[in-house]
Image (cartoon, rainbow, N blue to C red):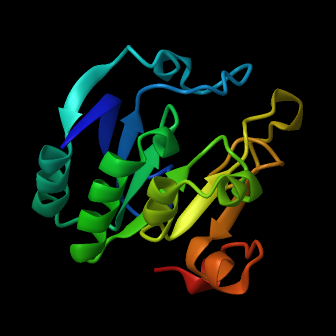
Amino acid sequence: MEIRLSGMVNDSIVDGPGIRLTVFTQGCPHHCPDCHNPQTHDPQGGFLGDTHLILKALAENPLLDGVTLSGGEPLDQPIPCKHIAEGAKKLGLNVWAYTGYLWENLLDQKNPNVMNLLQHIDVLIDGPFLKEQRSLELQFCGSKNQRLMDVKKSLEQGEVVLWERETDF
């Protein structure tokens, strides 16, 4: 399945716990000032990739603990990202995703493709990067407004449930 990418990092240790394959999607509507990945903003930039090749890379690396969908804005490509997340789960890997959207807005939109993707994500880091709330002390996010959410528990309980390290994968 086709997906527009900015790139991938095999063996990342900064985009979630353990060793991860990080998929950087291309295209982002948020344009956060001082974004860590401004080259991913242009929706026509990057290159076309294939989710089957990404899943092959996941399967071939026995050191991986999980996959992280980053960007750009991965939730703007929910169908190919769901394909990656679903395949990762079948391999026994955990799935993290970064989004500039707020959880509450995602639920309000009721986009069935986004909701299907969320079903396959373990941890979602939501909210735009806010330069004035930037902190280098935070783990796995860049500004204090961003939340690391346990998606399954949040969906079950109907409210935001933050991810706790003790429930690590």
Residue at image coords 56%, 66% = 123
Of the pair 81 and 132, the residue shown nearer to us: 81
Q: Please indicate, yes or no, whether residue 22 appears anywhere in the rendered image.
A: yes
Residue at image coords 42%, 53% = 68
All told, the count of numbered labels is: 0
When the figure is inspected, residue 159 is found, relative to residue 130, above or below; the finding is below
Report the side of 140 relative to 46 (left or right): right
Report the side of 135 relative to 150 (left or right): right
Report the side of 136 relative to 11 (left or right): right
**Quarter where residue 154 is shown:** bottom right
Instruction: From the top left corner, tell me how far across and down residue 134 is, in percent.
Output: 81, 36
Q: Residue furthest right?
A: 132
When the figure is inspected, residue 57 is found, relative to residue 92, above or below; the finding is above
Residue at image coords 20%, 46% = 51
Of the pair 17 and 146, the residue shown nearer to us: 146
Report the side of 86 relative to 39 (left or right): left
Instruction: From the top left corner, tell me how far across and down residue 159 is, in percent.
Output: 77, 76
Q: Please indicate, yes or no, whether residue 17 appears anywhere in the rendered image.
A: no
Quadrant (top left, top right, bottom left, bottom right) of the N terminus: top left
